[in-house]
Image (cartoon, grey):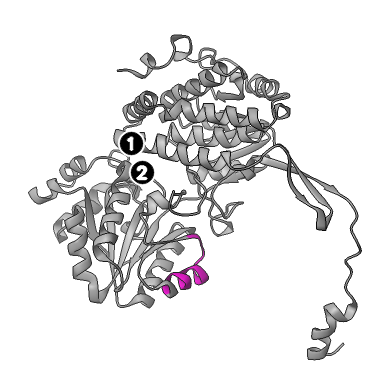
Amino acid sequence: MSLTSKIPAEHATGIVSATPAISLNALIATAKSAMQGFASLGQERLDEAVTALAWSIYEPNRARALAELACETTNLGDVASKITKNQRKTFGTLRDLMRVKSTGIIETLPERGLVKYAKPVGVVAAITPSTNPSATPVNKAMMSLKGGNAVIIAPSPLSWTATNATVEAMRDELHKIGLPPDLVQILPKPINRDRTTELMRLADLVVCTGSLNNVKAAYSSGTPAIGVGAGNVPVIIDESADLADAATKITASKIFDNASSCSSENAVIIVDNIYDDAIAALQRAGGYMTSADERQRVLDRLWQDGKLNRDLIARSAQMLADAFDLSAAAREATYFMVEETGIGEGYPLSDEKLSLVLTVYRAQDFSDAKDIAVRILEFKGKGHSVGIHTKDMDRARELAEDMQVVRVLVNQAHTFGNGGGFDNGMPFTLSMGCGTWQGNSISENLNYTCFLNITHLVTTIPEDKPSEDDLFGAYWAKYGK
């Protein structure tokens, strides 16, 4: 069944997309008009809007239809994974958003004489990637409307058709509950760098998930911006790990949506004394270890002129097995392991691959494994995340203390845990900040607080002024005045 058969006919072609000549100034004006008075409707109404957006993609028929359309239009990922993403991420985000206040008084601190009021940031320009043409737009729209804002989605040119259908589904749900559909709009065709840059310039806030160039453009737009970084996740397996559990989780995470996620494992680093056992566990879970000749074909064909071959990223294992001319045994595998020793320029296997290719490093011990992970992230993906499979929490804490990453995941399937999980405390999101380590303005998962302005009501309190000796006494005693 086609997507348009699941979306009312009057919205199937799109209100905004039907007028591609519309100016960006008019688009912004329409958004501002739609959000006029929206936040003042109160928390209950904002939460109804958020729930409507969630239902627009969570509803089973639409979840499937949007997943099918995404795969048809982008040739990236797989339908089953995108259905899961459309529903799981949306459900988790809705859970998070329903538990918090985002308008009016959100916090009172009488001991400090402070009352905090949440207010909208304005019109949000949400730049979204081709890898998630439905889930990411809804995720950002939910967070935007939670704060009383309007949002304009700017998708990649490759995914415009799928994202437009997603936007129209959101607009229909808003219309159904009596709210202005123009709270959510899409940048009309043609989608190009100039028009996206102009939208970023005109908006009140830019939230960018996508290529490094798009993130840099967001930060250079002159508009307050939140950009997130690229992944290149290394995961350590140490000698204390439950190898079967680690292999099962790594495999499930690696193959999800054909490894198109920035949180997908790109390298696994295995300590020497359990290396063979760990490889065997990964093979039992669905991995295939390439031979030396096959490894060379992977290198020759996954990269073209130093860049990832777009015809091979986020594609099925069967397609890659054919493209790499792998053995008959590989045709039964769900992903492909390639051994590597080098890191950095000249060693493309140490980079993000966006494909069902997992680089494998052998480490002498945990210290060496940690060093390999550091060097991988220094080359590409610094700030994003690292994982470890271990029973020794001291090692996990050591990674958290020493490594320049925002997230350290312990004994988890990285793709499912990094952007929030029902069994960890990270907020659900599809956009992961990487801190200043990767030139980002946030070192957390994108969340609703990023879409709020806060007014502080300040009243006097009993004087809180320590003496000079309280503040300087220890310094004077140690160093003198």
**Quarter that holds the C terminus:** bottom right
Which residue is painted at 52% across and 71% down in the image?
401
Name the disc covering residue 260, or none.
2
Q: Please, what secondary structure does the residue beneath circle 1 have?
A: loop
| Quarter-of-image position of residue 360 | bottom left
Q: Which mark is residue 448?
A: none
Q: Which residues are magenta?
A: 395-407
Left or right: where does residue 286 sit relative to residue 410? left
Q: Is residue 402 covered in magenta?
A: yes
Q: Is residue 56 visible?
A: yes
| Residue 467 part of the magenta segment | no
Disc 2 crowd rating (10 Å Cα; few below 14, some 14-19, many 20+) is many
* Cβ atoms under marks 2 and 1 closer than 8 Å: yes
Name the residue located 47 percent from the left edge and 21 percent from the top edge: 169
Return the residue at label 1.
Answer: 76
Cα separation, mark 2 vs mark 1, equals: 7 Å
Q: Is residue 150 above or below residue 93?
A: above
Please name the amino acid that badge 2 sits on: Ser
Label whose residue precedes the other's in the sequence (2 or 1): 1
- Nearer the observer, 67 or 131: 67
- Secondary structure, mark 2, is loop
Image location (x, y in percent) of residue 146: 62, 35
Q: Residue at x 51, y 36 (%)?
A: 139
Residue at the image point whose x is 17% and y is 45% from the top: 321
Say above or below: 193 vs 306.
above
Under mark 1, the amino acid is: Leu
Question: How busy is the neighbourhood of tag 1: few (under 14 within 10 Å), some, or many (20 plus)?
Answer: many
Rendering coords of residue 368 (x, y %) = 36, 76
